[in-house]
Amino acid sequence: MTTLNSEPVASLLDRLFTEADACRIDIPAAFAGMTDDQAHAMLGSRTDYLDLYTRMKDLPLPVSREAGSLLYMLARFGNARSIVEFGTSFGISTLHLAAAIRDNGGGRVITTEFEPSKIARARRNIEAGGLLDLVEIREGDALVTLGHDLPESIDLVLLDGAKGLYNDILDLLESRLRPGALLVGDNADMCPEYLERVRAIGGGYLSIPFADDVEISMKIG
């Protein structure tokens, strides 16, 4: 048995995913009064992200069940001890990452979220999973919270916050990525500059798409 598929984490995640599925019908309300083009532009914006995520502060916005399992497997396979997550939301992906850290023998997940109400919910969920001792939650804009006090070496990064900032977040973390470190970008297609960077020949990364909405990249340089 692993931490991921044993109690209390297994039933907690099942409940959180079920609740998140039920909330999907509420997502359009966050874009009330906007055209489809305006909504799409906001999703990839580097300037309007605070407004965007304030609109969606009551929505879980989790990774898929499959992506969560993938995160756990990647972290276990790479024996990750130092993980950085951009975008905590309700802590569903954080639980997967922290479960892997537990099963790897210990370490730390640094996760960041600017919405205080989401931080409170994430903290309760992570505590309910018995994994809070492995997680450091930083409150505020990730461009600030991830700009200091980073681990000397980072094994895995999950990018699942404001899509337009993926390239900026990579700027903050890149010098700490160890050779072989993995980047997992959820909905990375919403940040073309990021995809261009990690897919560039000779750019220091090997990168492939996974399923319809995840980009997995490995630091090779």
Image (cartoon, rainbow, N blue to C red):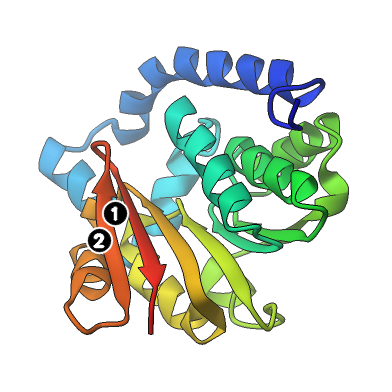
Image coords of residue 83 (percent x, y): 63, 61
**Does 177 sit left or right of 205 as displayed?**
right
Residue closer to the observer: 132 or 27: 132
Residue at figure coordinates x 68%, y 45% from the top left: 100
Image coords of residue 204 (percent x, y): 32, 81
Q: Quadrant of residue 25?
A: top left
Assign a secondary structure to mark 1: helix
Residue closer to the observer: 200 or 56: 200
- On the question of residue 64 being in view, the answer is no
Numbered badge on residue 6 = none
Say what amino acid the circle numbered 2 marks: Cys
Name above or below for residue 141 compared with residue 91.
below
- On the question of residue 124 being in view, the answer is yes
Residue closer to the observer: 148 or 71: 71
**Does 48 sit left or right of 147 as displayed?**
left
Which residue matches tag 1?
A: 188
Say what amino acid the circle numbered 1 marks: Ala
Categorize mark 2 by other alpha carbons within 10 Å: few (<14), some (14-19), many (20+): many
Residue at figure coordinates x 65%, y 15% from the top left: 15
Residue at figure coordinates x 53%, y 39% from the top left: 57
Name above or below for residue 70 compared with residue 202.
above
**Does 191 sit left or right of 5 as displayed?**
left
Name above or below for residue 176 compared with residue 138.
below
Which residue matches tag 2?
A: 191
Mark 2 vs mark 1, CA separation in Å: 6 Å
